[in-house]
Amino acid sequence: MFYRHLRNELWKLFGKKRTYIGFGAFLVAQNAMLLLFHFSRWQRSFENLLAGNGYLATEYISALTVAVFLLLPQVVLLMPLYTALVGGDLVAKEAEDGTLRMILSRPVSRINLLLAKWLAGGIFSVLLVAVLGAAALGFARLWFPWKSMAVNWPPLQIFSLVKAQQGLGFYIWSHVFMALNAWTVLSLAFMFSCFNMKPAAATILALSFVIMNLVMESIPFLERFHEYLLPHHFRIWLFIYQSPIPWGEIVQSVIILAAFSVTSFLIGTAAFQARDIKS
């Protein structure tokens, strides 16, 4: 019975046009950034960085290198937006349309219904990240050769040069952690969606919470509290490119994000159980 509920939620989720907004936006943004990288000073400055450190730039300006650079701004700006948009719709939209009354009039428990919706949102998050990574690498491969990977991210003191095969493994692992990030934001929006509010309000509250964490992280005297803020743990997908890889810190962040997602689900479930929807 639960499998049927989950399948039904997936049909409803992927039957909505707004579900595909994020996929389309990623494709447009990646092509725009790819053109900028290829025809602007962005590529030249990166080549100068490699040459200044004694490396042959032509060996590391590759599809894998460019794909990671395409992902950086999209993961920070676009991915939270579209996961929150879907998460905020999961419950609040059906409550607004009145379809929850019909669903709850059938012999299905509220917690099973919410669990099916939450898992459907998690599947959406994984697919969104998979399409994001595959499209970035595919489009980059059309313009750049398959060679070694170079990753440079000064805020985290990351400067890594690896062979193509190892770089592809890192690239895949980074998307596993990125999917957890997406599910965390979706869970936050899902929690607000379980309260008595409009879908837009649930989405805005989730994004406001994430932005508030980013603002707090940028305040200098709060630097010692960074480990208590979500953005610090969202960067685990970049930690995989550090040398050596800080697996201890990665595992800690994975546990914290997973616990945050489950807690968001439980809070949302408790709020939804207290709501009077059938009257």
Image (spheres, rainbow, N blue to C red):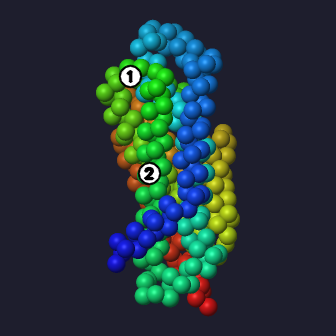
Left or right, 106 with reference to 36 = left
Q: Quadrant of the N terminus?
A: bottom left
Quadrant location of the C terminus?
Answer: bottom right
Identified by mark 1, the residue type is Trp
Q: Residue furthest left?
A: 165
Q: Position of residue 158 (x, y in %)?
A: 47, 28
Can residue 104 be seen in the rendering of this structure? yes
Q: From mark 1 to mark 2, how far is it between C-alphas? A: 25 Å
Q: Is residue 118 left or right of residue 22?
A: left
Quadrant in the rendering for residue 63: top left
Tally the marks: 2
Q: Position of residue 189 (x, y in %)?
A: 58, 62
- State the image coordinates of residue 187 (x, y, percent, origin top left): 51, 61
Q: Residue at x 59, y 38 (%)?
A: 28
Looking at the picture, does residue 49 appear above or below residue 129?
above
Q: Would you name the residue on which mark 1 appears?
A: 146
Kindly give the residue lying farthest to the bottom in the view shown. 279
- Identify whether 205 is placed above or below 76: below
Write the residue at 59% across / 44% down: 25
Residue behind mark 2: 127
Give neighbour class at mark 1: few <14, some 14-19, many 20+ (Cα, 10 Å).
some
Element at label 2? helix
Q: Amino acid at mark 2?
A: Leu
Q: Is residue 251 left or right of residue 144?
A: left
Q: Secondary structure at mark 1?
A: loop
